[in-house]
Amino acid sequence: TPEKDDHRTGYDFVVVANRLAVNRVTSSDGSTGWQRSPGGLVTALAPIMSSSGGAWVGWHGAADETLEPFDHDSMHLHPVPLSEQEVEDFYEGFSNGTLWPLYHDVIARPLFHRHWWDAYKRVNQRFAEAAAVVAAENATVWVQDYQLQLVPQMLRDIRPDVKIGFFNHIPFPPPGLFAQLPWRHSVMKGLLGADLIGFQRESDAKNFQRAVRARLGFYIKSDRVYVPLDADAAAPLEGFTADPARGTAPRQLSAPAEGTYRGSEATAFPISIDTDRIVELSNDPKIIARAAQIRAELGNPETIFLGVDRLDYTKGIRHRMKAYEELLQQGKLQVGTHTMVQIASPSREGVESYQRLRDEIELAVGRINGEFDTMGHTAIRYLHHSYPIEEMVALYLAADVMLVTALRDGMNLVAKEYVAARKDGSGVLVLSEFTGAADQLRQALLINPHDIDELKAAIVQAAVLDREDVRKRMRSLRRQVVSHNVQRWAEEFMHRLHQL
Ligand code: G6P
């Protein structure tokens, strides 16, 4: 494509996400290039991109580096620069030190810093301006995730002609927790700039609607928020109010008059995975052989338990280890017969709560292995690395039991990938009820990870579950994941957006 960074000619479909859709790769001769990111979102959107002249706006992951837009793999990439200070204040700070813990039920304490908020506003404005530059007249722009919640309204202010979608990949917290955010009104108004706001679960969409109703007073009917065109006049501003209602707004009890509002719909669209790709890999003889090799290398135990997570305090990794340690102590599990593989991929290592978590987990692993390992066998094979999807599927095939014990998770795609890989109907999924995936994967062994005794019972049950029961559950889980892939998710979102 020729240089098209001009909205008279620009792109009809634009994705805006904190991360660009490509990663930089260095070859053996030292030269660098780009490779499409392996995630499901990129996979789902790439076909829409190439068929409709699409562009992706995002940060390329390095600080203090400005890159010219470029084309790769029939996608137009538009890198947004972040300074080192902005990585600290916008990315590690407001996104991952304020919003991430607040939106995940304050599992860690959210920090509120005004200079983080200033950086969040400034960087969101930069993303909105970049999107405004690449979008063609009447284009569709799809903004992704909590790092960019102000972009919809900022973009609408610059480009009222474009259709704007937003999808929140993480939970939206209950209004009582969201209310802690000093900039709650601005965040809601930022999101309401979108024509369609997608959430993972029904309960996330409802949480958002309740916050909007209580704090902004806007009328809502059947997921449709009636946003007054003069929204600033209609809603209380941020800051101190002596009013006993304390920042809550007088509620509108009926739909406002035609011509005085625009609609913004807040609905659930649970995301999924590229199911075909996982199934294809799970049929690959090389990957099947690798799965057997993994089992052999672990000493051919009877039962392999697997955990795969970004190293994040939302994932309940410590709860999982606590349960496993107690089962070893009580002799209900035995090293040699049972083993656990824990993949913990490095994540957000500049954020203090993540550094602390890593220390805690590595201390626990060291303690457990020190006590229970034998010369030939390990209690927990802990790997602090990320692996390519081929190796992940080999692990899914090798594991008898998948442990997903998140304390809160927007969706949890690992649970869905495990199910997709188990084509022969074997394998047990232990799944936290606090994941979005639990709304769809009802035949998993659903657990409350805070209840260590229940978690222990589920781990033991998973290891001894009768074959027919295992198959029945897995068949039902697979029906769900096979019929609801990420391509369908993207189509349904886009279809709804274009109806609005
Ligand atoms: C979650 C978020 C994504 C984020 C990813 C990795 O899945 O919803 O927006 O990109 O984690 O985190 P990172 O901070 O490395 O982008």
Image: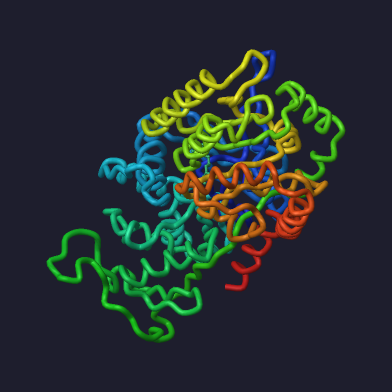
Question: Residue 396's quadrant in the figure?
Answer: top right
Q: Is residue 318 left or right of residue 375?
A: left
Query: In x, y percent, where is residue 157?
Result: 41, 61
Q: Is residue 61 above or below residue 423?
A: above
Identify the residue shown where x is 52% and y is 18%.
370
Query: In x, y percent, where is residue 79?
Result: 54, 38
Query: In x, y percent, where is residue 250?
Result: 26, 77
Identify the residue shown where x is 43% and y is 45%.
126
Residue 389 appears in the picture as rendered: no
Query: In x, y percent, where is residue 494?
Result: 63, 63
Quick one: 320 or 161, which is closer to the camera? Answer: 320
Question: Residue 153's quadrant in the figure?
Answer: bottom left
- What is the residue that sits farthest to the left in this orientation? 242
Q: Is residue 158 left or right of residue 338?
A: left
Q: How many tags in the picture?
A: 0
In what quadrant of the picture does the C terminus appear?
bottom right
Q: Is residue 285 left or right of residue 181?
A: right
Quick one: 223 or 90, which is closer to the camera? Answer: 223
- What is the residue that sits farthest to the right in this orientation? 285
Identify the residue shown where x is 67% and y is 15%.
376
In what quadrant of the picture does the N terminus appear?
top right
Residue 234 appears in the picture as rendered: yes
Identify the residue shown where x is 68% and y is 33%.
304
